[in-house]
Amino acid sequence: MKYVLLSFLSLFIFLINFFVIEGYHFSTPFFMINSIIYKIISTIIYVSVNLSVLNILVKNKSVLGNKLKILLIINVFFYSLYNLFTFKIISPFLSFASKMFHFISILHLNEEIILQNKTSAKLLVPYIIWTFYLTLTSLFTFFINNT
């Protein structure tokens, strides 16, 4: 039951982030995708991450380790901060900093998930690639807007 509530909370946080995403309000690099494609990819990534966690829950009989729970919370926190700083507060530096911490948290999350279930870790590969891309674009955006 508590994981059903966790799933609804996850969906609620995702939907808040989904509606925060608008057009960019500062100069962006030429390889930055538009906000509509960003929403589509974010939705696919959201499903992939949830499938990964669900796979762990099924294999471990509905038990998530404390470290994994903490890493998931940190991950969602920095994901939300990035969207907030990029699309609402409009701060290229804070956007880059939050995305860098997000990328680091994903690497730790993937490391923990590999220990639990290799199949679930494979589901996170698109998420890692996507976050790396966003980290690079936020770095370039920061430099473009601060020169």
Image: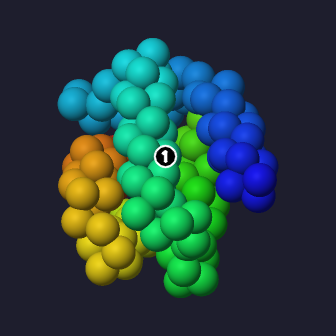
Q: Which of the 4 image quadrants contains residue 63?
A: bottom right
Residue at 67%, 46% in the rendered image: 7
For the residue pair 95 and 115, the one nearer the viewer reads as: 115
For the residue pair 40 and 55, the one nearer the viewer reads as: 55
Q: Is residue 96 left or right of residue 83?
A: left
Residue at 23%, 28% in the rendered image: 30
For the residue pair 3 and 44, the one nearer the viewer reads as: 3
**Residue 97 seen in the figure:** no
In the image, residue 107 above or below residue 45: below
Residue 64's spot in the image, x, y percent?
55, 72
Residue 80's spot in the image, x, y percent?
62, 50
Q: Is residue 86 left or right of residue 29?
A: right
Q: Amino acid at mark 1?
A: Asn
Q: Which of the 4 image quadrants contains residue 76?
A: bottom right
Q: Which residue is mark 1?
A: 50
Q: Which of the 4 image quadrants contains residue 29?
A: top left
- What crowding class fits label 1: few (fewer than 14 Cα within 10 Å), some (14-19), or many (20 or more)? some
The secondary element bearing badge 1 is classed as helix
